[in-house]
Amino acid sequence: MSFLDFLYERGVINRDIYEIAQAKSDETDSDVYDFLISIGDFNEEEITKLKSEYFELDYTDLKCFRKIDEIDYRALEDFLAIPFDVSSECVCVAIAEPNSLETKDKVSRLLSLRETTKDLAPLYYVASKSIIKRKFQEVNQSETNSINKIIIDAMKKSASDVHITPFEKTFKIMFRIDGTLTDYKTLHIDEFQRLSISLKAFAKLDISETRRPQSGHFQKDSVDFRISTHPTLYGENIVIRILGKDKELISIENLGFTEEQAKYLKNITAYPNGTIIFCGPTGSGKTTSIYSLIEIMDKKSRNIMTLEDPVEYKISNVRQTEIVRGVINFADGVRSILRQDPDVILIGEIRDEETAKMAVRASMTGHLVLTTIHANDCFGVVSRLREFNISSSLIADNIISIISQRLVRKNAATGRTIICEILKIGKDINEMICRGESMQKLKEYAVSNDGFKTLSDDCKTKIQNGTISRKYVPSVFLQEN
């Protein structure tokens, strides 16, 4: 017996309505329900309750809704099926179309992916489309508000990162402000799973995967957010990097370079070819410094192209490309860019031998290359490139300068400034690198003969002139050279 036959036999509809609705039934049951509501004799809840009788399922108005934290509600929204309670035996699910096998299959597969629901069967109830849609809106709004508040507060405080760390009974949310982690909130661990699932859903990560690291991104109000998860003893540690693509670039003078250093850096950006390398740990401001150099270049007469992971600033008249894992990497990107007639190439980071060799090739063929590499100091860069099987002669012949930098809190209440060392590859240093001299000998010569100032020297100078305070400086930079 069809639903129409059921209604007709019960005397709910007359013969005329039955015949008109019968024609609709050649389409879908959903069209029939909508038609019965449209003629004005029935409201949606009345039809839904009759539907529950026909399918012999209980009706619910979802007033007893209880959100199940481990469920990805977004995955079910289009199917109009919403889990609303859970017991030791089943998961209660409100469904608008009880005869939809596709919807029931989606629900079963979703429950099977969750540790707490994989052994539980769905128990279906019938609810109206409007009530289910309204409940989804409430769920989405509550999740969005929670995430939005964290993000908005982080941005108000000029945080660069948000750390969400679970412990045995609580989890902590911290903001990295001016390089220092500061507490934001400590919450009960019961709320952690809801927040982590919401964030992973925002970033289109696999919410069922908790044992392997994942990374993704999402965007809000022209701001990019990069999210990284990492498994720990009590759950996934989550870090969100805040990337304001539209934020204003800081001039090279205001970053913290001395007048003499800024003048030198401006001069070498005019070189037609060669490599300028910035080094330092993550969060030391390397990329910001390179952006500031690109900003002062003549971007109309020079074709400047970049490969970045991710793009942190948008720069006018610069062709910027974002690395996409599985689609384009740094080495392949350089190969492609070399066919684009570039003058200047920014390679976001040298991470492997292939990228290192492509960077050298680019500088050898008449291009100015700006890039970064992870190394402790300027001389460590030479060692890293040798580890990537770049010959000493190619290193010496192609590098213009190496800049090592760190960010240190200013003496004022907020903000950070750069401490740096700059190695200029002159004739004598060039020859020493070619001979394969040790890092220690290179440093001793540079300090004794080229007036090379170390990170420690720059740090002490800035302490003396009051730019930074001793209490904010890592002790390693206060030791004698």
Image (cartoon, rainbow, N blue to C red):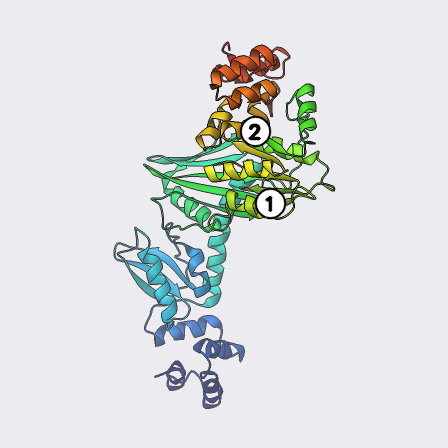
Q: Position of residue 378 (x, y in %)?
A: 53, 23
Above or below, 296 against 124 in this view is: above
Look at label 2 and name its amino acid. Answer: Phe
Which disc, if any, is residue 81?
Answer: none
Tell me the SS state at disc 1: loop
Q: What percent of the width, then of the height, locates residue 215?
A: 45, 44
Q: Which residue is mark 2?
A: 278
125 sits to left or right of 227: left
Label 2, residues with CA under 10 Å away: few <14, some 14-19, many ≥20: many
The percent position of residue 163, horizontal first and vertical second, equals: 46, 35
Answer whether labels 1 and 2 touch (C-beta < 8 Å).
no
Residue toward you, 177 or 52: 177
Relative height, residue 56 to residue 116 (above, below): below
- Residue 290 visible somewhere in the drawing: yes
Near-viewer residue (323 or 216): 323
* Rendered-image quadrant of the N terminus: bottom left
Residue wearing tag 1: 338
Image spot of residue 285 (x, y percent):
57, 30
Q: Amino acid at mark 1?
A: Leu
Choose top left, top right, bottom left or bottom right for residue 454. Answer: top right
Q: Which residue is more in the foreground, 151 or 427?
A: 427
Q: Quadrant for residue 338, please give it.
A: top right
Q: How many numbered markers are drawn?
A: 2
In the image: residue 307, left or right of residue 71: right
Residue at 49% across / 87% down in the picture?
20
Spatial CA distance of label 1 from label 2 is 22 Å
